[in-house]
């Protein structure tokens, strides 16, 4: 059985706005404006134009972050004296 998360409902549950201005979206994702635009261009997150403003759908940020792969590290080898 596959778990399905409704990220729009999750955004509402968390008290987040449905859309964020690009500056706030970049801050939420800990990326700069260039990386944010790259993610939008690649279809990784959903961007929209609202007049002159670029806004990002909050649910798409939550979905993107939830689907990031886990970090993997090699075991640390101590230096022999």
Image (tube, rainbow, N blue to C red):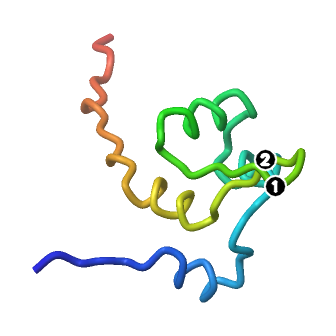
- Residue 61 as seen in the image, left or right of residue 15: left
In contact (CB < 8 Å): disc 2 and disc 1 = yes
On residue 25, the disc is none
- Residue 69 as seen in the image, left or right of residue 37: left
Position in image of residue 5 (x %, y %): 37, 77
- Tag 2 residue: 54
Question: Taking 70 as reference, is 18 above or below it?
Answer: below
Q: Residues within 10 Å of mark 2 (few under 14, many from 20)?
A: some
Which quarter of the figure is the N terminus placed in?
bottom left
Give the quadrant of residue 59: bottom right
Position in image of residue 46 (x %, y %): 57, 52
Q: Secondary structure at mark 2?
A: strand
| Residue under the point 29% across and 77% down | 4
| Residue under the point 55% across and 37% down | 39
| Residue under the point 48% across and 74% down | 7
- Tag 1 residue: 50
- Residue 59 as seen in the image, left or right of residue 36: left
- Residue 53 as seen in the image, left or right of residue 39: right
Give the quadrant of residue 36: top right
Question: Taking 81 as reference, is 24 above or below it?
Answer: below
Q: Residues within 10 Å of mark 1 (few under 14, many from 20)?
A: few
Q: Secondary structure at mark 1?
A: strand
As drawn, which residue projects farthest toward the left?
Answer: 1
């Amino acid at each position: 059985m596959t778990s399905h998360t409704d990220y729009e409902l999750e955004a509402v549950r968390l008290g987040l706005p449905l859309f964020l201005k690009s500056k706030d979206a970049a801050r939420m994702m800990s990326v700069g404006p260039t990386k944010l635009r790259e993610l939008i261009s690649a279809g990784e997150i959903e961007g929209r134009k609202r007049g002159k403003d670029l806004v990002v759908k909050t649910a798409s940020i939550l979905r993107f972050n939830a689907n990031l792969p886990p970090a993997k590290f090699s075991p640390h080898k101590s230096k022999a004296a």
